Image: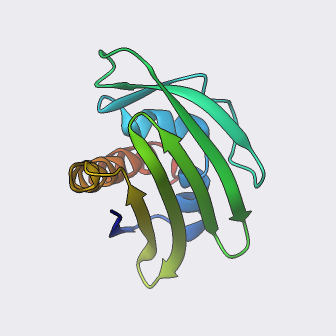
Amino acid sequence: MTAQISLSHDYTASAKDVWRVATDFAALAEVCRPLITFEGLPEGRCEAGQHLSVGVRLFGLLPAQDYQMEVVAQDDVAMTLQSAEHGAGVKSWRHHLTVTPTETGARLTDTIDIDAGPLTPLFAWWGRKLYAHRHKGRLRLLAENTPD
């Protein structure tokens, strides 16, 4: 059983600034808090070909679960990122992220194909909540780090 979710969020920051935040591991950790915390997340930006083995903790409280992430593709010019992930009850979490310029800033679109067996509907619900939460964190990070 698989599900696809897609969320788009608009920002008043430039596409370049949104892309910078969307591809930075420290920003990822920040925008996921407190819903998810990571153990073993590297520093710096995502790069194509990276294979990551991290621990994820739900609400920062539950025991860390093994989670694997591979950056399948990353294009700074096109501002696209694709990852293949699994672990913590998920058979497959295929994420495609795109940042596109708009008249007022940028739009970030996340499309995720999820396979968690019989729990797929629950993980799809969780994915929608998590990615909406990430948007709020990115708004804050962009406001703090974008010159006036």
Indicate the position of residue 112 as horizontal and vertical percent values. 42, 63
Image location (x, y in percent) of residue 116:
36, 50
Residue drawn at the location 64% of the way across and 70% of the way down: 79
Comparing 22 with 52, the one in front is: 52
Q: Is residue 59 left or right of residue 44?
A: left
Q: How is the image coloured?
A: rainbow
Q: Nearer the viewer, residue 113 or 109?
A: 113
**Rendered location of residue 143, percent (x, y):** 41, 49
Horizontally, is 127 left or right of 125 in the view? right
Q: Is residue 90 above or below residue 88?
A: below
Residue placed at 41% from the left, 78% from the top?
A: 104
Q: Is residue 97 above or below residue 101?
A: above
Q: Is residue 148 visible?
A: no
Residue appearing at x 35%, y 44% in the figure? 137
Q: Quadrant of residue 105?
A: bottom left
- Name the foreground residue: 53 vs 46: 53
- Where residue 145 sits in the image (x, y, percent)? 51, 45
Residue 66 position (above or below residue 4):
above
**Quadrant including the N terminus:** bottom left
Q: Residue at x 44, y 85 (%)?
A: 103
Kindly give the residue lying farthest to the bottom in the view shown: 103
Residue that sits furthest to the right in the current view: 49
Figure label count = 0
Position above or below: 62 against 43: above
